[in-house]
Image: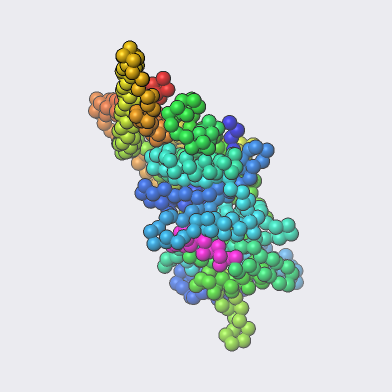
Amino acid sequence: MSVHKQVARTKIQNNSLNSSARSPAPNLPIGRASSKISDWLIRVVAVTDTRPPTSARGQQHESHGDLRSLSSSLFIIILHFLYEIMAVHGPVVKIHPVVLASIVDSYERRNEGASRVIGTLLGTTDKHSVEVTNCFSVPHNESEDEVAVDMEFAKNMYELHKKVSPSEVIIGWYATGYDITEHSVLIHEYYSREAPNPIHLTVDTALQSNKMNIRAYVSSQMGVPGKTVGVMFTPLTVKYIYYDTERIGVDLLHRTRASPSRTNGLTTDLAQVASAAGRVQEMLSTVLSYIEDVLSGKVMADNSVGRFLMDLVNKVPKITAEDFESMLNSNINDLLMVTYLANLTQAQIALNEKLVVL
Amino acid sequence: NLPFFITCLVVLKIIKHYQEEGQGSEVVQGVLLGLVVEDRLEITNCFPFPQHTEDDVDFDEVQYQMEMMRSLRHVNIDHLHVGWYQSTYYGSFVSRALLDSQFSYQHAIEESVVLIYDPIKTAQGSLCLKAYRLTPKLMEICKEKDFSPEALKKACIGYEHMLEEVPIVIKNSHLINVLLLDLQEKSTVADKHELLNLSSSNHLEKSLQLLMDRVDGMSQEIVKYNTYCRNLTKQQQQKQQYLQRRQQENTQRQSRGEPPLPEEDINKMFKPPQAPPRMDTLLIAGQVNNYCQNIKAFTSQNLGKLFMAEALQGHSS
């Protein structure tokens, strides 16, 4: 058993060494993260390693096969884990929904026979993050052994866009599709001439993993200096960022998912308040059912949720009934007066209209 | 009126354009692109117009537009100019400029619309995007360019018949739906629910102030028209008096045997006063109407919210 543990531990050490080679620079968090992973994995190995050996020869063979399959599955787990943790390094990529909608739209309009579309990303950068706010697609031809991108077009479009929003700069490029191909490397090289440290964004519109995977990469050199030098794409964290008005717009757009014809009209004002009230009611009933469950013992009570509940109950301001009445009445009076004035004005201009025609 | 389709990309682009480039009471404008499918309009893309800056006098708008459309055609984006969009400040968009632009668009393509995006109302909780078209009656009048009261009377045009609102329907493709699902999963829950905000006085004050300005303008126009009417009637009276005197004199002269005085051209003597153009009045009336409707919608929403707050308080007390 100790031999297995030892082999597993060395495999994990090797993996953590590989992981540090993947990062652009050795960093403390990675060391801590990989040690955490190795501890966790050792515990996993120890737990799964409690089978009694069958026979002397069979034991050796079995243990090797088990170890290989175990280590390969462990390797895959580590890779996925590391993607999440690795992505902490490098700038954070903040994307606005406009960009994604535009990419999807240009994918839908691609030429016959093109399997993917590429385009330029525009936005702003600062020390720790890159904010992508706009994009445009660039026509390109791609075949097995060559790729041609219309660079004139890209330059032209960038000039035109700069006239509208002078603060946006080229920060990278996007491509639809799941993998990074060799052609991507060439295109990325072109873009690194336009922008320092460009970001490469992939949007999986073919929905390979039943989800639209949106990933961002930054390229870095790897290999032996002087001899074979290659380019490696390291993943970055992707966050979605909205302006307030954008979020409100996106909320409305979400409702088109519900209708079968994918359409949705814009609602009238009072109906919106009604639907907002409905939403609050739903949320309240969810919270109430959770509280019932906790009280009847079905669900364990969670202290943090309890604290949130206290916040919620305390948010309703405690005012004496008369004060509240007077506040409410004065507000209602204001609104009613304004409505009356508006109606009066409308009647006035209608009257004026008729008098002129006489 | 048939509703027309708009895709989510256009909505997002318009929101972004205002957010980034148009702070304060500046209007931002842009062009809508799309296609006409069996007399139904579909807007599929848009691009913004740069602001008019003072140091860019030689900026050629037409050239920018041409270049943009040519480039977009390369990437298979519909390049039919089906309308334009504009942001508005508290609903004040009924103006001569808008009329002129919309007329030129509608002259070229009959189904053009102007999309008015109200960012302040949107920030209050729900997307406010309205589409307008000029009524056929107004199109006729604009074509004639005759804005005198008689012409308007003949056409029976009132301020309510100037712009007609076209309902908007948002239509998304399946892939966009997938994207929206993905976004919803991965984004954090919104922490601001502006729609249920109870404060109303700021918005009301500004709206009422704008309304008062317009009403003042309206009253000035009315005064102008009234003076014109009065002048006209006075002139008629004077003409009558002159004619009568002439006739009297002529009969006197005839009785005395002298030749009658030559008939003078009374029209040259009494030049009719200039009729004030009614177009401005019409526009102001339309604008006032729009303000009033917005205010009423806003107050009804707020009343609803106040009653909700009352219910909440009632439960806890």
Asked if one can make out residue A335 in the rendered structure from this viewpoint, the answer is: no
Residue B137, x across and y down, in percent: 53, 31
**Label tally:** 0
Residue B63, x across and y down, in percent: 53, 58
As drawn, A236 above or below B141: below
Q: Which of A227 and B61 is in front in this view?
A: B61
Residue B73, x across and y down, in percent: 63, 56
Q: Is residue B115 left or right of residue B91?
A: right
Where residue B39 sits, quadrant-wise, is top right
Residue A286, x across and y down, in percent: 48, 36
Q: In this view, does B11 lie to the left or right of B54?
A: right
Q: Which of B270 and B12 is in front in this view?
A: B270
As drawn, B63 above or below A357: below
Q: Which residue sits furthest top?
A: B255
Residue at horizontal 39%, vertical 49%? B26
Q: In this view, does A223 lie to the left or right of A53?
A: left
Q: Is residue A104 magenta?
A: no
Name the quadrant of the N terminus of chain A.
bottom right
Q: Is residue A161 magenta?
A: yes
**Magenta residues (range):** A153-168
Q: Which of A255 and A350 is in front in this view?
A: A350
Residue at horizontal 61%, vertical 47%? B34
Asked if one can make out residue A358 in the rendered structure from this viewpoint, the answer is: yes
Q: Is the magenta stretch mostly helix, strand or loop?
A: helix
Residue at horizontal 60%, vertical 65%? A153
